[in-house]
Image: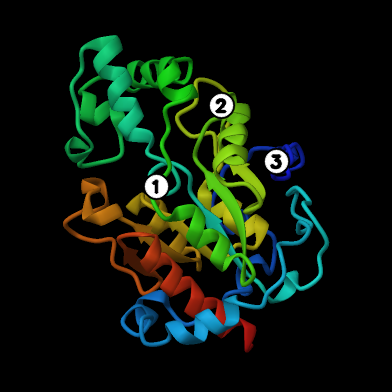
Amino acid sequence: MRPRALARPAASLGQPDSPAGPHHAAAGCGQRGAALQSPAALASTAAAERGVASSLLTGGSSPSSSSGSGGVSLGSSSGRERQLRVAVDVDEVLGRFLHSLNKFCLEAYDMRYDVSDYWVYDFAKIWECCQDESNEKVHAFFDSHHFAAGIETIPGAYDSLLRLRPACEFMVVTSRQHVIQEPTLEWLEEHFPEVFSEVHFGNHFALEGASRKKSEICHAIGAEVLIDDNPAYAKECAEAGIHVLLYDWQHGYPWSKTPDGPRHDRITRVRDWAEVEQVLGVLAAQRSMT
């Protein structure tokens, strides 16, 4: 039997785009994680406390319905109030976007790049072109088979998310553009069925339409934790009171290794989904006791 399809996030996108920032969040949205310790403080003890998290994760119920913030309902709301609300990025956290983009650039423009060449996640700077040209090339990639069928998943992501699902409610918060909303949802349905309750698009670097900051989206949906590979988003959200797991897969993401940080009590670096699972397990166990 085919897993239940992820509902289309029409309601998620129904909120008007606005200048983003933590001060535009609804009152009280950022308070849900106030009782949680910093992930940085938890990281060193996560392995020792893994048994606590494991015991919590063995007997939970499946994810329930949406919050009242414009997300999509995928089930009942029973038990949802005890779950840790976690926002998850897509590119380089769930899927290998750069890997496929580099293949496209080589084929279409004879541009040869490896993931290791991206010292910053800003394609215009890496490709040494203007922002408009960079945006045009990325949107051409969206129309290619490399994007349509070529985004591989990050190893371990789906299994870890399934194990954590009884203790966590997962929502996608991506900077992806509205123009690729449908293929993004289809990709999530295919590779991550029965995981995410809501999907939210920031529409960054788009050819048209306004964008929204990740910190604004996270506050609006009540996310207490963000998993993201971009240090700029990590710092932005940490300063807005959101705990961040800065994802650096096998320490192979140069853009996640800026010389001066980011350093923040709410930011913890993780190198794979096993480490994500450890930290989230402890945070979820801690939250269930508050």
User: What residue do we see at 20% from left, 42% from top?
Assistant: 119
Residue for badge 2: 180
- Label 3 sits on what residue type? Arg
| Residue 105 image point, x, y percent | 28, 18
| Residue 54 image point, x, y percent | 51, 80
Q: Residues within 10 Å of mark 3 (few under 14, many from 20)?
A: few
Q: Residue furthest front?
A: 1
* 82 vs 277, nearest the viewer: 277
* 63 vs 66, nearest the viewer: 63
* Residue 32 vertical placement versus 148 (above, below): below
Residue for badge 3: 2
Q: Nearer the viewer, mark 3 or mark 2?
A: 3
* Label 2 or label 1, whichever comes before in sequence order: 1
Q: Nearer the viewer, mark 2 or mark 1?
A: 1
- Label 2 sits on what residue type? Ile
Asked whether the residues under the numbered discs 2 and 1 touch, taking CB atoms below 8 Å apart as contact, a structural biologist would say no
* Residue 29 vertical placement versus 208 (above, below): below
* Residue 93 vertical placement versus 122 (above, below): below
Residue for badge 1: 154
